[in-house]
Image: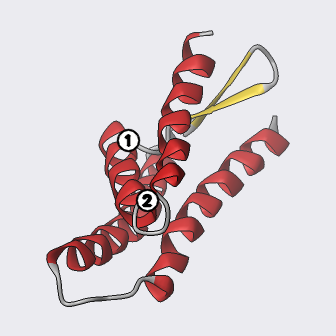
Amino acid sequence: KQARVRAGYFVYFVFWLNVLWTLGFLQFKNDWVSLVNGLTALSLCISLPVRLHALYSYDVTPFRVKNGDIVLGFGTSLSWLVCYTVWNAMLVVDFAPGLTLQDILFWVMMFFFYYH
């Protein structure tokens, strides 16, 4: 069980790094999309560790193991996930609109594993 918890925190760390690295990668143009993307990335980077720390402080586990091997994470709120999805779609649509498929599949897989 402890290994699954560490794996869960690792997933949140990767989530956080996925947002953080884009701050150095973003091409900040003088337009509102770049500004919103940058500010949203900062908000996501700050809010995730704050929420995980709050859950830890109140002894609330951010993970649940389903069927013995599927780890479900509850460390991110629904609003954080929606914000992350919109931010990620806005970020990748400049490179290739087809990359937004990852955001759609992200939600499909979450619903599948949660309700299956």
Residue to which mark 1 is pinned? 77
What crowding class fits label 1: few (fewer than 14 Cα within 10 Å), some (14-19), or many (20 or more)?
few
Q: Where residue 98 appears, x then y in whole percent?
A: 51, 50
Figure check: 23 above or below 101? below
Q: Which residue is the extreme one toward the top?
A: 116
Q: Is residue 61 visible?
A: no
Q: Where residue 8 appears, x then y in whole percent?
A: 68, 46
Q: Quadrant of residue 12?
A: bottom right
Q: Secondary structure at mark 2?
A: helix
Please name the amino acid that badge 1 sits on.
Ser
Q: Which of these two is toward me, 114 or 3? A: 114
Quarter of the figure with the N terminus? top right
Please name the amino acid that badge 2 sits on.
Leu
Q: Which residue is pictured at 40% across the width and 44% down the height?
A: 81
Residue to which mark 2 is pinned? 48
Quarter of the figure with the C terminus? top right
What crowding class fits label 2: few (fewer than 14 Cα within 10 Å), some (14-19), or many (20 or more)?
some
Q: Secondary structure at mark 1?
A: loop
Q: Which of these two is toward me, 73 or 55? A: 73
Q: Which of these two is toward me, 41 or 71? A: 41
Choose the circle earlier in sequence order: 1 or 2. Answer: 2
- Kindly report the distance in space between the C-alpha atoms of the residues bearing marks 1 and 2: 9 Å
Q: Is residue 16 visible?
A: yes
Q: Where residue 16 appears, x then y in whole percent?
A: 54, 65
Q: Which residue is the extreme one toward the left?
A: 32
Q: Which residue is pictured at 35% across the width and 37% down the height?
A: 78
